[in-house]
Image (cartoon, rainbow, N blue to C red):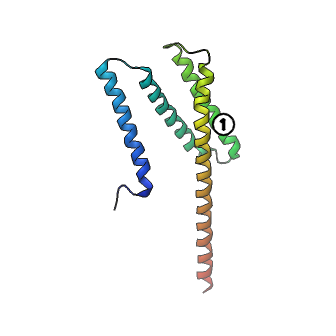
Amino acid sequence: MKLIDKKSFMPTVCVIYTILSVGKIVLEALTQGKFGSDQQNLLTILLFSFLGTLILSQHYRLSQLPLLLVAVLQYIILVGAVLLFTWVSGYFTEIHPNGYRDMLRSFTIPYVVAAIVYYVTLYLEVKKANRFLQQMKEEKKNANHE
Protein backbone atom coordinates (compact mmCIF):
# COMPACT_ATOMS: atom_id res chain seq x y z
CA MET A 1 0.00 0.00 0.00
CA LYS A 2 1.33 3.43 -0.95
CA LEU A 3 1.14 6.20 1.61
CA ILE A 4 1.43 8.82 -1.11
CA ASP A 5 -0.68 8.22 -4.19
CA LYS A 6 -2.35 10.38 -6.85
CA LYS A 7 -5.05 11.59 -4.46
CA SER A 8 -2.77 12.37 -1.54
CA PHE A 9 0.20 13.80 -3.45
CA MET A 10 -0.84 17.48 -3.55
CA PRO A 11 -2.24 17.54 0.00
CA THR A 12 1.02 15.98 1.19
CA VAL A 13 3.08 18.61 -0.66
CA CYS A 14 0.91 21.37 0.84
CA VAL A 15 1.27 20.03 4.39
CA ILE A 16 5.04 19.67 4.05
CA TYR A 17 5.31 23.16 2.55
CA THR A 18 3.25 24.61 5.38
CA ILE A 19 5.33 22.88 8.05
CA LEU A 20 8.56 24.06 6.44
CA SER A 21 7.29 27.62 6.01
CA VAL A 22 6.09 27.93 9.60
CA GLY A 23 9.32 26.30 10.82
CA LYS A 24 11.34 28.82 8.81
CA ILE A 25 9.33 31.72 10.22
CA VAL A 26 9.82 30.54 13.81
CA LEU A 27 13.52 29.81 13.23
CA GLU A 28 14.10 33.24 11.68
CA ALA A 29 12.27 34.93 14.54
CA LEU A 30 14.39 33.06 17.09
CA THR A 31 17.76 33.46 15.38
CA GLN A 32 17.34 37.02 14.14
CA GLY A 33 15.53 38.24 17.25
CA LYS A 34 12.87 40.03 15.23
CA PHE A 35 9.47 39.24 13.86
CA GLY A 36 9.04 41.15 10.61
CA SER A 37 5.97 42.01 8.61
CA ASP A 38 6.71 39.25 6.08
CA GLN A 39 6.58 36.63 8.82
CA GLN A 40 3.43 38.20 10.25
CA ASN A 41 1.74 38.22 6.83
CA LEU A 42 2.54 34.55 6.19
CA LEU A 43 1.22 33.53 9.61
CA THR A 44 -1.90 35.67 9.04
CA ILE A 45 -2.51 33.85 5.77
CA LEU A 46 -2.11 30.53 7.59
CA LEU A 47 -4.54 31.65 10.31
CA PHE A 48 -7.19 32.76 7.82
CA SER A 49 -6.70 29.59 5.76
CA PHE A 50 -7.28 27.56 8.91
CA LEU A 51 -10.37 29.58 9.90
CA GLY A 52 -11.84 29.48 6.38
CA THR A 53 -11.34 25.73 6.11
CA LEU A 54 -12.77 25.18 9.59
CA ILE A 55 -15.88 27.24 8.88
CA LEU A 56 -16.44 25.65 5.44
CA SER A 57 -16.07 22.19 6.93
CA GLN A 58 -18.95 22.86 9.33
CA HIS A 59 -21.58 23.32 6.59
CA TYR A 60 -23.19 19.97 7.42
CA ARG A 61 -24.28 21.34 10.80
CA LEU A 62 -26.55 23.75 8.94
CA SER A 63 -27.72 21.30 6.27
CA GLN A 64 -31.38 22.02 7.06
CA LEU A 65 -30.88 25.61 5.81
CA PRO A 66 -30.68 26.68 2.15
CA LEU A 67 -27.12 26.51 0.80
CA LEU A 68 -27.02 30.20 -0.11
CA LEU A 69 -27.96 31.17 3.45
CA VAL A 70 -25.30 28.82 4.86
CA ALA A 71 -22.67 30.32 2.55
CA VAL A 72 -23.64 33.87 3.53
CA LEU A 73 -23.60 33.01 7.26
CA GLN A 74 -20.16 31.42 6.90
CA TYR A 75 -18.87 34.48 5.07
CA ILE A 76 -20.30 36.85 7.70
CA ILE A 77 -18.63 34.86 10.50
CA LEU A 78 -15.30 34.89 8.70
CA VAL A 79 -15.50 38.57 7.78
CA GLY A 80 -16.22 39.31 11.43
CA ALA A 81 -13.10 37.36 12.40
CA VAL A 82 -11.01 39.21 9.79
CA LEU A 83 -12.25 42.61 10.91
CA LEU A 84 -11.77 41.71 14.58
CA PHE A 85 -8.22 40.54 13.83
CA THR A 86 -7.51 43.80 11.99
CA TRP A 87 -8.95 45.85 14.85
CA VAL A 88 -6.86 43.99 17.46
CA SER A 89 -3.78 44.34 15.25
CA GLY A 90 -4.34 48.09 15.35
CA TYR A 91 -3.29 48.05 19.00
CA PHE A 92 0.13 46.67 18.06
CA THR A 93 0.85 48.31 14.71
CA GLU A 94 -0.45 51.29 12.83
CA ILE A 95 -3.17 50.42 10.34
CA HIS A 96 -3.25 52.22 7.01
CA PRO A 97 -6.41 54.31 6.48
CA ASN A 98 -7.52 51.76 3.86
CA GLY A 99 -6.38 48.81 6.00
CA TYR A 100 -9.83 47.43 6.76
CA ARG A 101 -10.91 47.65 3.12
CA ASP A 102 -7.67 46.08 1.91
CA MET A 103 -7.85 43.29 4.47
CA LEU A 104 -11.46 42.59 3.54
CA ARG A 105 -10.60 42.46 -0.15
CA SER A 106 -7.51 40.32 0.46
CA PHE A 107 -9.68 37.83 2.32
CA THR A 108 -12.88 37.94 0.26
CA ILE A 109 -11.45 37.16 -3.17
CA PRO A 110 -9.62 33.92 -2.26
CA TYR A 111 -12.40 32.87 0.12
CA VAL A 112 -15.14 33.20 -2.51
CA VAL A 113 -13.08 31.22 -5.02
CA ALA A 114 -12.32 28.52 -2.43
CA ALA A 115 -15.96 28.37 -1.28
CA ILE A 116 -17.19 27.96 -4.86
CA VAL A 117 -14.69 25.18 -5.52
CA TYR A 118 -15.63 23.53 -2.21
CA TYR A 119 -19.37 23.61 -2.76
CA VAL A 120 -19.16 22.53 -6.40
CA THR A 121 -16.94 19.60 -5.34
CA LEU A 122 -19.36 18.77 -2.51
CA TYR A 123 -22.29 18.85 -4.94
CA LEU A 124 -20.50 16.51 -7.34
CA GLU A 125 -19.61 14.11 -4.49
CA VAL A 126 -23.21 14.03 -3.26
CA LYS A 127 -24.45 13.45 -6.79
CA LYS A 128 -21.95 10.59 -7.21
CA ALA A 129 -23.01 9.05 -3.86
CA ASN A 130 -26.69 9.31 -4.83
CA ARG A 131 -26.01 7.54 -8.14
CA PHE A 132 -24.17 4.80 -6.26
CA LEU A 133 -27.06 4.40 -3.78
CA GLN A 134 -29.56 4.26 -6.64
CA GLN A 135 -27.45 1.62 -8.37
CA MET A 136 -27.29 -0.43 -5.16
CA LYS A 137 -31.09 -0.20 -4.73
CA GLU A 138 -31.63 -1.37 -8.30
CA GLU A 139 -29.22 -4.28 -7.84
CA LYS A 140 -30.97 -5.29 -4.62
CA LYS A 141 -34.36 -5.02 -6.32
CA ASN A 142 -33.14 -7.16 -9.23
CA ALA A 143 -31.63 -9.74 -6.84
CA ASN A 144 -34.95 -10.02 -4.95
CA HIS A 145 -36.87 -10.62 -8.19
CA GLU A 146 -34.66 -13.52 -9.23
Q: Identify the residue at horizontal 62%, vertical 51% (top origin).
A: 120
Q: Which quadrant: the N terminus?
A: bottom left
Residue at the farthest left position? 31
Residue 81 appears in which quarter of the rendering?
A: top right
Count of number-bearing discs: 1
**Against 28, is 58 above or below?**
below
**Against 89, is 121 above or below?**
below
Q: Identify the residue at horizontal 44%, vertical 21% (top origin).
A: 37
Q: Identify the residue at horizontal 66%, vertical 36% (top origin).
A: 73
Residue in the foreground of this view, choosing between 90 and 58: 90
Residue in the foreground of this view, choosing between 9 and 92: 9
User: Is label 1 in a helix, a strand or a loop?
Assistant: helix
Kind of residue sitting beneath label 1: Leu
User: Where does label 1 land, which residue?
Assistant: 73
Q: Position of residue 12 (x, y in %)?
A: 39, 48
Q: Position of residue 102 (x, y in %)?
A: 60, 24
Q: Position of residue 80 (x, y in %)?
A: 61, 27
